[in-house]
Image: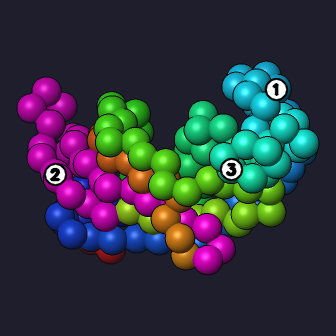
């Protein structure tokens, strides 16, 4: 586990967890939450500017969250709350059926919490990329991270 003290500005990490997007999932999500023709109708999508079905931006964000919360290993950050804020969300390329996605991040800012001495506040620049290593989605996320308990030795 990584505590606040284990991180520093510039620390980078790429998750091993991968997520493959299916056509069925794209259509099901968009049918419920974002029923645009290029998300739910293969024929209409082929004549759109995308030239085929693409995942909804809301769906992409949900996949980003899923990947980050599925990763379980010794390098998982001891986050207390991962949603203090999301900024600078950008979709760089469409996500299509069959794409395999991964996430990575770089710590860009850190400070100790003024109201909770046992926590630090960390901001990361996150990136989602596909099987061709193309960046498809980026954002900045700010979250609370536990400080190392006094009884626990450094990693």
Q: CA distance from mark 1 to mark 2?
A: 39 Å
The reply to whether residue 54 is in sight is: yes
Tag 2 secondary structure: strand
Q: Residue at x 9, y 32 (%)?
A: 114
Residue pointed to by mark 2: 110
Expressed as whole percent of the image width and height from the top left, the position of residue 141 reads: 35, 44
Tag 3 secondary structure: loop
| Residue, far front | 47
Marks 3 & 1, CB-CB < 8 Å contact: no
Q: Residues within 10 Å of mark 2 (few under 14, many from 20)?
A: some
Q: Residue at x 88, y 44 (%)?
A: 42
| Residue, far bottom | 132
Q: Is residue 133 left or right of residue 26?
A: left
Expressed as whole percent of the image width and height from the top left, the position of residue 10 reads: 21, 69
Sequence-earlier tag: 3 or 1: 1
Q: Nearer the viewer, residue 147 or 38?
A: 38
Residue pointed to by mark 3: 50
Expressed as whole percent of the image width and height from the top left, the position of residue 118 reads: 21, 41
């Amino acid at each position: 586990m990584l505590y606040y003290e284990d991180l520093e500005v510039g620390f980078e990490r790429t998750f091993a967890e991968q997520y493959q997007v299916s056509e069925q999932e794209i259509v099901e999500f968009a049918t419920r939450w974002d029923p645009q023709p290029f998300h739910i109708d293969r024929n209409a999508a082929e004549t759109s500017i995308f030239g085929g079905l693409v995942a909804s931006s809301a769906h992409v964000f949900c996949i980003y969250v899923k990947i980050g919360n599925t990763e379980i290993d010794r390098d998982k950050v001891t986050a207390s709350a991962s949603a203090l804020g999301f900024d600078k969300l950008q979709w760089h390329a469409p996500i299509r059926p069959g794409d395999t996605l991964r996430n990575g991040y770089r710590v860009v800012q850190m400070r100790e919490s003024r109201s909770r001495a046992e926590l630090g506040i960390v901001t990361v620049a996150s990136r989602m990329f596909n099987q061709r290593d193309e960046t498809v989605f980026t954002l900045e996320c700010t979250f609370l991270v536990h400080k190392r308990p006094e009884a626990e030795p450094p990693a």
